[in-house]
Image (cartoon, grey):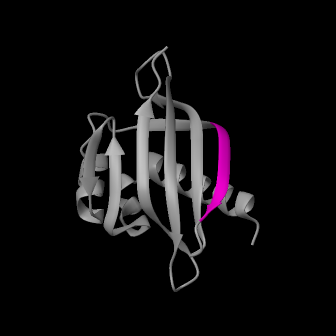
Amino acid sequence: MDPDAVARAFVEHYYSTFDANRAGLANLYQDGSMLTFEGQKIQGSQNIVAKLTGLPFQQCKHNITTVDCQPSGPAGGMLVFVSGSLQLAGEQHALKFSQMFHLMPTPQGSFFVLNDIFRLNYA
């Protein structure tokens, strides 16, 4: 298993799902998962998806600039750090963002998001 390939595949899946059907992200999180979104901490799959689907825009398009990953701990986890921009429908300027995912393996051989930290980057 190539960690960089896993990270790239996860990032592609996450953002294409976010852009097309945010509710579809529910299966990437578990009850113990935590999202910190612009400083607000949200725990549990249902609460995280409620936050993401309740954002004040319907459509957006993520453009990923970088994906960095590192192995994390003896259980086979991975840290994935993403930077890029997101374009909201009807807005002229894209917003720069950074997002960090702590992925943990599942018994089925895939990964779930244990920790997710999102920040817009203001310049």
Residue 58 at x, y = what percent?
33, 38
At horizontal 45% and vertical 18% (from top left) the residue drawn is 122
Q: Name the residue nearer the viewer: 94 or 2.
A: 2
Quadrant in which residue 113 is drawn? bottom left
Asked if the stretch drawn in magenta spans residue 81, the answer is no
Q: Is residue 102 above or below residue 90?
A: below
Query: Hey, which residue is sitting farthest right in the picture?
Result: 2
**Which residue sits at x=53%, y=85%?**
108
| Of 24 and 8, the residue lying toward us | 8
Q: Which quadrant of the structure image shows residue 4?
A: bottom right
- 45 with respect to 63 (left or right): left
**Quadrant where the image shows the N terminus:** bottom right
**Residue 70 colored magenta?**
yes
Total numbered circles: 0
Find residue 28 and report its horizontal and vertical position in percent.
Answer: 43, 65
**Depth order, front residue of 16/51:** 51
Q: Is residue 21 above or below residue 113?
A: above
Prevailing SS of the magenta stretch: strand
Residue, far front: 74
Image coordinates of residue 48 in percent, x first then y, are 29, 55
User: Which residue is drawn at the image coordinates 53% and 38% (left, top)?
Assistant: 62
Q: Is residue 12 above or below residue 119?
A: below
Which residue is pictured at 66% across the width and 52% down the height? 69
In the image, the segment drawn in magenta is 65-72
Q: Is residue 93 above or below residue 4?
A: above
Residue 70 spot, x, y in % from top left:
66, 56
